[in-house]
Amino acid sequence: MSSDPWGRVDETGTVYVRTAEGEKVVGSWQAGTPEEALAYFERKYEGLVVEIGLLERRVRTTDLSAKDAQTAIDHLRTQVDEHHAVGDLDALRVRLDKLVATVEARREERRAQKAKQADEARTAKEALVAEAEELAQSDQWRSAGERLRALVDTWKGLPRLDRKSDDELWHRFSHARSAFSKRRKAHFAALDAQREDARKVKERLVAEAEALSGSTDWGPTAARYRELMADWKAAGRAQREAEDDLWNRFRGAQDVFFAARSEVFAERDAEQVENLKLKEELAEEAEKLVPVTDLKAARAAFRSVNERWEAIGHVPRDARAKVEGRMHAVERAIQEAEEGEWRRTNPEARARAAGLTGQLQAAVDKLRAEVDAARAAGNNAKADKLARELEGRQALLDQALKGLEEFGG
């Protein structure tokens, strides 16, 4: 018979292992010596030790699921309980029990972590839903659409909740996206309709602009182009491709007209500058007639200057008032000379002036006599009143005498 601290082999070849509950039969050995029998079953024990050690390491260092870990533990426990090995089987059972506790602790830890993750996922998804529902009312079509797509990607990266909660939140999320898409589609459909209307309006404007491009009726046509531009701005934008093409045609038609007008105006401006030089020379010639000494000669000379003036044509607008003012000043001087000559040579006017002078002289003489009489009578108040009246009549008489002198005395 052979034995060691954890087992023995009896004379019949039966192998036993010692446990806290007493000896347990391990098996029968007939193929060799008792020592070989013990060594064989000790190696089986060492195999169990290795397997348990490996399982402990897997539980400690990997994400082995609690279910798989428990299955492995149960398998090893069966082998230990079947007593087909010689060694400290009770120590193996203790290690397996500790491993069960570890796995259970890990299970609870994972359950708590999963619950925490679920709460975090619920909070995150509720936030996504709230933002999506807010974005559903936005008119910022590009940025809101991009943000909603980003929210979908974020949603896909979050853990699923329980089916009921996840479905409810997804329904709200999906509904918000659908509502935004529906509003955006309606907006762009209306925008397309508006742009089509704008295209039709602008085609009519382009047709008229092109028809006017050859006009030489500069003022009214330029005014009409300004009206067409105002109508163009009020029409809104057409589709991008049509807008660019129509604008190029519209602008091109205007450019043709205004380029032609500018060319004509440039020629006209040059002509008007030359006209101004000629009119300034005529104004200088006319100014030499003042002061008027020979009315007849001055009148004839001014008529000659004026005829040449009228034949010249327009001058630049900003110089017109000054040069015309010089001519008007000469014309007024000649007119005043004519009026003076008329007064001197008109018999009826002379007679009227002489008659008025005589009447005023008689009135003055009469008032002077009345003043003297009042003074002599001692009626100074009456004399002062008459003297004031005399003063006024005398002033009129002096003015009349001066006028009479203009008729030659």
Image: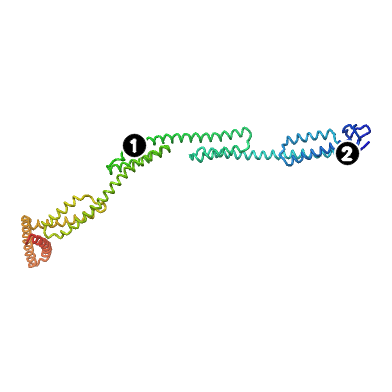
Q: Residues within 10 Å of mark 1 (few under 14, many from 20)?
A: some
Vertical position of residue 17 compared to residue 311: above or below: above
Please state the horizontal and vertical placement of residue 65, each as a whole percent of the image: 72, 36
Residue 107: quarter of image: top right
Please state the horizontal and vertical placement of residue 92, each as a whole percent of the image: 82, 38
Q: Quadrant of the C terminus?
A: bottom left
Q: Nearer the viewer, mark 1 or mark 2?
A: 1
Residue 82 seen anywhere in this rendered image of the structure: yes
Residue 13: quarter of image: top right
Q: Nearer the viewer, residue 94 or 390?
A: 94
Disc 1 from disc 2: Cα separation: 112 Å
Label 2 sits on residue:
6
| Residue type, numbered disc 2 | Trp
Q: Residues within 10 Å of mark 2 (few under 14, many from 20)?
A: some
The residue at 75%/35% (across/down) is 70
142 relative position to 352: left or right: right
| Residue type, numbered disc 1 | Ala
362 relative position to 326: left or right: left
Q: Answer with mark 1 or mark 2, whichever residue precedes in sequence.
A: 2
Please state the horizontal and vertical placement of residue 268, each as a whole percent of the image: 26, 48
200 relative position to 321: left or right: right
In the rendered structure, find residue 385 and report the number of the disc placed on it: none
SS category of the residue bearing label 2: loop
Q: Nearer the viewer, residue 207 or 404?
A: 207
SS category of the residue bearing label 1: helix
Label 1 sits on residue:
207
Residue 15: quarter of image: top right
Vertical position of residue 300 compared to residue 192: above or below: below
Is label 1 in contact with label 2 (beta carbons under 8 Å)?
no
